[in-house]
Amino acid sequence: MTDYQFFNEKVSPLLVKWLNEEIRFYLFADIGQIYFAYASDFASKEIAAQCNYERREIVFNIAWIKERFKKNEVFLVKYLIMHEIRHFYQRRVVESFKNRENVRIYEPQAMLLSWQKNFEKYIDITGSSELEEKNYFSQPIELDATAFAYYLMQHLHPNINPRSLYVPKYAVDYIKKSRGFYQSFFQVADQNKRYYF
């Protein structure tokens, strides 16, 4: 069995199960599928995963996930899943905001407008230059997805060492100042135990 077959047939169902167990925190019903591809299939071999909103897919870099399993860093896999699924929610809530749908939206209007602008002019990462990393990780949707995943991992796993979660240096300040927002969001999700989209 090739790595491609193993991860897509054996590991993918496990990761989808993780997603479904925590669905109340995503406020997003259609979480889609998780697939695996080789590093050469990505714009940069440095990309660990990416989401495709239209196809409802999260695609992981096989080389990255093999390294996580080899180092027994399964929590980083879950952390990245939470980061990527947050992008689905961001896109869906921006659509609802633009279309003036009658749904409950938790984010302030200024945040939604910044997400909307960011999706219109999203900067993808294709290499590893310092400037490109800064431009990529400093985007509003990337900052939010990083903080969301960071605090959700701590909410679900209180004993986890926060330093073991990868946080780009460009996101550190945002994470520090946004703690209360995400914690209150997770408390609401714990009480409601439902999703909205």
Image (spheres, grey):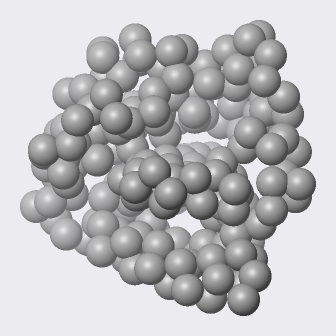
State the quadrant of the N terminus. Answer: bottom right
User: In percent of the image, x 20 and y 27: which residue is there?
Assistant: 180
Q: Where residue 117 sits in the image (x, y, percent)?
A: 70, 29
Residue drawn at x 60%, y 60% as measured from the top left:
66
Front residue of 29/127: it is: 127
Looking at the figure, which quarter contains the C terminus? bottom left
Residue placed most toward the observer, 6 or 12? 6
Q: Is residue 182 visible?
A: no
Location of residue 88 (image quadrant): bottom right
In this rendering, is residue 85 above or below 46? below
Residue 21 place in picture, x, y as percent: 30, 74
In the foreground, 13 or 21: 13
Task: Give 46 or 79, whichever is nearer the viewer.
Answer: 46
Q: Residue furthest front?
A: 70
Position of 25 relative to 139 (above/below): below
Q: Position of residue 22 (x, y in %)?
A: 30, 67
Give the total number of marks visible in the rendering: 0
**From the viewer's perspective, is 141 left or right of 41?**
left
Residue positioned 80% across, 44% down in the render: 45
Whether residue 167 is visible: yes
Q: Is residue 48 left or right of residue 4?
A: left
Vertical placement of residue 176 versus 69, above or below: above
Left or right of 159 on screen, residue 89 = right
Residue 107 sits above or below residue 81 on the image: above
Q: Position of residue 191 (x, y in %)?
A: 10, 61
Q: Residue at x 80, y 16 (%)?
A: 129
